[in-house]
Image (spheres, rainbow, N blue to C red):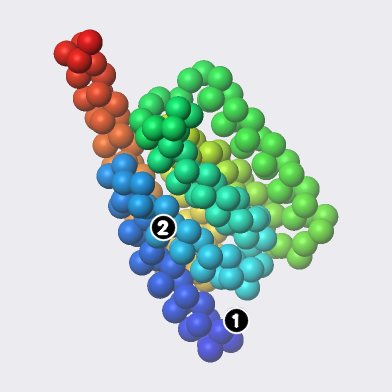
Amino acid sequence: MTEEFLTNLIGLQSIGTALGVMQVLLARKNNIHNYLFGIASILIGLWVHYESKLYADLVLHLYYLGMSIYGWVYWKYGKQHEEAPISSASPNEYIKAIGIVVGCFILMSTWLVGFTDSDVPFWDATTSAFAWAGMWLMAKRKLQNWVFLNISNVISIPLLIYKDLYVYAGLTVFLFIVGTSGYFTWRKIIKNEQDQQPANA
């Protein structure tokens, strides 16, 4: 990468990072407006990952965009036209999430190896596969979204460093920390709601 190009990427990463930080902090607080910041961050990420030839992450960001719009609507209206609560994933939803991981990895790695010039096809595909499942669970407002997203984060950090995307690597470390906190915060919310149910019955 040329110095000027790398500088431009760092600038875009910084803006995307700031928006991403706001998104994940709001998500941790169970605030629906996290999706506004998330969508803006995703649009910047699309360009950065395209320029870095991280094509699986590029497709992942397109998926993020769609799931963010879906999640925004689902969080707001749910299935019964009322706000969907946080809940734990059912066994069936676990199976679907794992299926998303396996299916995404197969599709992404096949595409990256056969039709792109990616130099990290399997690494890139694995990162994306867990993130796809995590975003689906996030859109469904399921506690376990944090688990799948953090697996993706752990795999993604060294990949981003390898690609000289240091700002995004730093953001991903931050996302891992907040994701861990988010899991326990959401679990506490679920427990508090369960404790209140008998009193409201």
Is 111 left, or right, of 12 in this rendering?
right
> In front: 85, or 127?
85
Which x, y percent locates residue 88?
40, 25
Quarter occupied by the N terminus: bottom right
Which x, y percent locates residue 85?
36, 30
- Residue that protrudes farthest toward the front in the picture: 81
For residue 151, say whether it is visible: no
The residue under the point 37% across, 35% down is 83
The residue under the point 67% across, 41% down is 104
Q: Earlier in the sequence, mark 2 or mark 1?
A: 1
Task: Using the image, tell me which numbered label, if any, was put on residue 1.
Answer: 1
Please determine whether, in this image, residue 134 is positioned above or below residue 127: above
> In front: 185, or 72?
72
Q: Amino acid at mark 1?
A: Met
The residue under the point 37% across, 52% down is 34
Task: Using the image, tell me which numbered label, if any, was put on residue 36.
Answer: 2
> In front: 30, or 112?
30
SS class, disc 1: loop
- Residue that protrudes farthest toward the right in the picture: 114
The residue under the point 67% across, 42% down is 105
Q: Amino acid at mark 2?
A: Leu
Please determine whether, in this image, residue 30 is positioned above or below residue 46: above
SS class, disc 2: helix
Assess disc 2: are there few (<14), some (14-19) or many (≥20) residues with their C-alpha within 10 Å of its C-alpha: some
